[in-house]
Image (cartoon, helix red, strand yellow):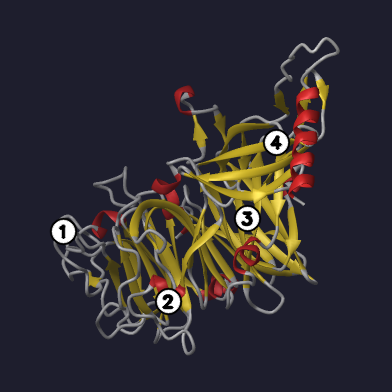
Amino acid sequence: MKYIYYLMTVLVVGLLFSACYDKENTIRRLPDLVIGNVASGSVKTGEPIEITPTCTMGGEEVECTYNWYRYHGSLAELISEEASLEWRVDTIGSVTLQVEATHVETGIQSLLSFTYTIVPRIDRGWLILKETSDGNTDMDVSLVQANGTEFATDVLSLALGQPMRGRPVSVLSTDNYMWYNPETGSAENYQVCLTPVSEKEILMYRVADEKVLVRNEDLFFEVPDFASGSIEAYMKLSNNASLIHDGRAHLMQQGTAAFMPALLGNYHLAPYQVCYGYSNPMLVYDELNSSFGLLQSSSNMSTVMEIKYFDNAYRDLDELRISPSGMNADLIYMGQTDGSIDPEHLTNYGTAYALMQKKDDRDNLLLYGLTSYEWYTGAYSPIRFARTIPVSRCEAFATADFYTMHQTRNQIYFIKDNQLSYYDIDDDTFVMNIHMFEGEVTYCKYIANNYDYNESSWSGPLYDSRFDRLLVATSSGTGYTIHSFNWSVNGGLTLVPDLEMRGEGKVRFMLWYTSNWRLFNNIYRYS
């Protein structure tokens, strides 16, 4: 047996050496094995890296086997043994890959390393939070890409394996979430995340890799009772976030990874949070005490434990003196506009308009204007405007299905029985029946996108995606239609059929997302 083994070894070695000799017994070097059709590049989140390599020796294509590796620092992980690579990235930033080719006939090998940059797929475009047929929450996206618009459906189900529980509430974004990475045990600051919110869930959905970092229990120091109550409103500013669950307020401060327990006190907040600017307190209305108050951000030296109510005090120059506390009134709607009503501060301060009705007077509506100038300290009453509007002037205004505030003019749009109308505060006039919608109206919001543009060539490609637009979503059967009305000073509202979007479900909230830093200074427009 040993003889046969040695004989076979000699024969194999002889064959190998003969492959390297010509007829004159001259040693000739085999040509290098060259890997082609493999290069560094970029890929969007969620898209696979697809590569079909070629191998040549001496200019002639040869047959090879392949191993594909992904590097974690200096450690290599085998990810494929196929001739063609199809691998979906599972990281952010960039990834280093390596292909190992082995020539089938000679066993000669060649290695080639290359790098792919991962570009977030969600960079600019519409996020459409929708209600599913079974009353839960999912999200479609209509994204601006280099080759046109990409429309993707049910992205939350793709990430979670199922929709979020409960009906949709909101979807906003943050550029400074602090995530505790369970694999490394360390904190990773300034995570850019979307924050989809439903009645029963909230989660942090990282934009870079469309990965859910944390959800529900991990986002609360003391988890609310989701079985008996629901999330009713959510808002995220630069330094803090607030969430209203069953009338109780939970705050998340900058530098923390979860919401604090509910603020103390005997109160029940209406599902409205109005802000102006990127770090101001949030204006709220306590239905139990019929009083306006503020959700303030904590500092490094103190923690907010209670709602800040306005003092019942007035400036010497205030001719209008209406207490913001004990108002004995129901809040019908509250919205924000950039225009100021404080004669002493006509710039850099916005206004919240609150449509209300006294509990003991159902024949009249009350419209109050509250200046954001007083939201910093709450030292004086913020009410700088008041008007009584008899219900008989426009019953639809008192009982509308949807309200939304024009964000650069003093107009309140409202929809009653599918008819779109508006109230002009400056002129004290109603403009009725602008448009009649078919199907069920499920969403109405005026959005003044003044933040998505780039005028500086040093910070990337120049573009301008700003718009002033009223969005109304309707539902018919199992599908939705989003109608877009452009607005201009001279022309008012104009329906733009080319901007129509369609999908499955019922639209409940929309956000024009952009990676541009200006979004985070203007996200208050979605309050």
Mark 3 vs 2, N-terminal side: 2
The numbered mark at residue 217 is 2
- Rounded to the nearest angstrom, the CA distance separating label 4 from label 2 is 47 Å
- What is the residue that sits farthest to the right in this orientation? 23
Q: Is residue 166 left or right of residue 267?
A: right
Image coords of residue 46 (percent x, y): 64, 51
Query: What residue appears at the point 28 percent right and 70 percent down from the top-left corner?
Result: 293
Is there CB contact under 8 Å for labels 1 and 2? no
Query: What residue appears at the point 52 percent right and 75 percent down from the top-left corner?
Result: 391
Residue tagged 1 = 315
Name which quarter of the figure residue 257 lies in: bottom left
SS of the residue under disc 1? loop
The answer to whether 129 is drawn above or below residue 74 in the figure is below
- What is the residue that sits farthest to the bottom in this orientation? 228
Is there CB contact under 8 Å for labels 1 and 3? no
Of the pair 419 and 511, the residue shown nearer to us: 511
Query: What residue appears at the point 76 percent right and 48 percent down from the top-left corner?
Result: 497
SS of the residue under disc 2? helix
Q: Residues within 10 Å of mark 2 (few under 14, many from 20)?
A: some
SS of the residue under disc 4? strand
Residue tagged 3 = 471
- Please name the amino acid that badge 4 sits on: Ala
Q: Is residue 229 left or right of residue 4?
A: left
- Rounded to the nearest angstrom, the CA distance separating label 1 from label 2 is 45 Å
Residue tagged 4 = 101
Q: Is residue 23 left or right of residue 207?
A: right
Mark 1 vs 3, N-terminal side: 1
Tell me the mark number nearer the camera, choosing from 3 and 2.
Answer: 2
